[in-house]
Image (cartoon, rainbow, N blue to C red):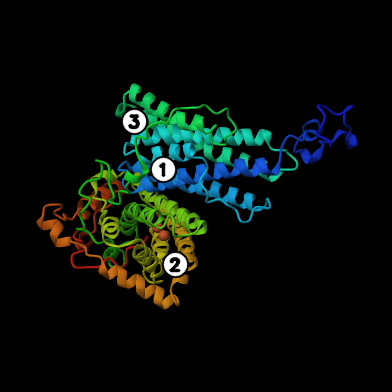
Amino acid sequence: MNTGSSATQRPYVTYRSLPELAGVCTMDRAIHANWSLEQSVARLKRLHYSLRRIHETLTEKITSQPIYELKTAFSYHAYLCAEQVDLIRRRVSEMREPPLGLDKDPEESLVVFFDEINGSDSTYELLLGIYELALPAVLEACERLKNDAHPLADAPTVRVARLIVFELQELVQFGKRALQCLADDSSTEDAEDWLEHLRIFLKVSGGIDGADERIEAERCKKRYPKEKAEYRREPRRDERFIDSFNAGVNPEVFLYDDRYSAQDKTLMMYYKRLRELDVPEMMASILVDLRHEESWGFHMEMSRQLWDEARHAMMGEVGFASIGIDWTKIPINFTWSRNLNLQLDARERHGVLFFIEQGLMPRTGKRYEWEVASESGDALSALFQDFDWADEVLHAQIGRRWYVPRYSDLKEALSYGDRCWSKVLSYWQDDLEQGRTEHWNWWPDLYEQACRIWGKTPDPETLVFAETYEGKRADLEEI
Ligand SMILES: [Fe+2]
Ligand SMILES: [Fe+2]
């Protein structure tokens, strides 16, 4: 058997010294036979498990994570991890693997490592676990895979490992900065203690890929037993979000009223975009509740959609920044995600999501928003609405792939979503009576401020706009 020699017998010669082997590696490297398909699959499966757990944990924390910058970052990072999971699944399926066996858990210590990170309720512990330990360990395992895999025989795996490193290093950078910014939330001693606690599980497992030397450890006590883990489905926002129950302004009525100017409508559209922060909060709950019921394809596509919705919220944030308006002075309502998460089950919530997204009529839909933005002279709004529209077309397709087939036809699927939406109680009056909000009309202040910046006199009719959500089902809410 040829197990490869340590070097070629003499310098290997190619045509006019062109790089050998399509440039994937040197002949000296290629003649080594210390790799196997079995090893490759085993490492990929552990990476798959780890990235899937990180994806699940980040998704699960989106709803209850109050800090806006983390909520949106978790949405992004969960999606990027999902893309890597997808890459790995495809590669494993190419290696004589069906049945893939990708849903089997690896050894217990690696399972517990991720359970512990997932179980903590502390943001700082979560950031340490994910960004200081888990993700760097994944990158390390990918680097090792890149080096150990046979560069020619297993070139597609090398490519996967390289792509993962390329895409995920930005997450680690983000995490490092986030930890520095929030360092006051934990003592150095507590942080070290937590990291040490987690490291033991990783060392017992031989690292993410199992290729490190393993240590023997006495049974470590779990801090956050899985049985006690509970998903927190009530959305939370940080202290910059004021008056989150406020439903004192109905942007849809304003947007579709021809009396108001396109420029004034862009302001309301930026608000509507930012308010979309409630969509990731709600979609995350669907993914958590259907974790074991739906296939990977469902989770992959819904994660993409979730990230798009977080992007839409950030487009609103950017819009306000472009005008020079402090969005924290405006109530960004969260009762949509709150009511849905607390009142409906996951299938019903998905029905509402599909019904609203599918129901964007041409007159009041995404094309209309883009037309208004284009007419307004605000190039940024036009750009954002252009992409927002494209994203929503994609979301409607995702709904048709993953939601509609559960029903006999599109009509039944839509009417189920409609019925679910009608079931949601909105508590407009209760919120007022119980002092959760006064539903104050924040529009005139915002509009006047924008007019000052734009250097124009406020339109008197626009200034007095005072439609609320009282007694209304927010049918036109676009997401
Ligand atoms: Fe959408
Ligand atoms: Fe959206």
Kindly identify the amino acid type of the residue bearing the numbered disc 1.
Ala
Front residue of this view, candidates 448 and 68: 68
Front residue of this view, candidates 312 and 321: 312
Front residue of this view, candidates 378 and 164: 164
Query: Where is residue 462 drawn, in percent x and y?
Result: 23, 60
Q: Residue at the spot x=50%, y=29% of the render? A: 203
Query: Where is residue 352 drawn, in percent x and y?
Result: 35, 66
Between marks 3 and 2, how big is the CA–CA gap? Answer: 39 Å
Kindly identify the amino acid type of the residue bearing the numbered disc 2.
Tyr
Kindly identify the amino acid type of the residue bearing the numbered disc 3.
Leu
Residue bearing mark 2: 403
Q: Residue at the spot x=34%, y=45% of the render? A: 227
Tell whether circle 1 marks a residue whose Cβ is less than 8 angstroms from ligand 2: no
SS class of the residue under badge 2? loop
Give the mark nearest the N terminus, 1 or 2: 1
Q: Residues within 10 Å of mark 1 (few under 14, many from 20)?
A: many
Q: Is residue 322 visible?
A: no
Q: Is residue 176 visible?
A: yes
Q: Is residue 297 above or below residue 104?
A: below
Quadrant (top left, top right, bottom left, bottom right) of the N terminus: top right
Q: Residues within 10 Å of mark 2 (few under 14, many from 20)?
A: many
Q: Residue at the spot x=40%, y=50% of the render? A: 310
Residue bearing mark 1: 73
SS class of the residue under badge 1? helix
Quadrant (top left, top right, bottom left, bottom right) of the C terminus: bottom left
SS class of the residue under badge 3? loop
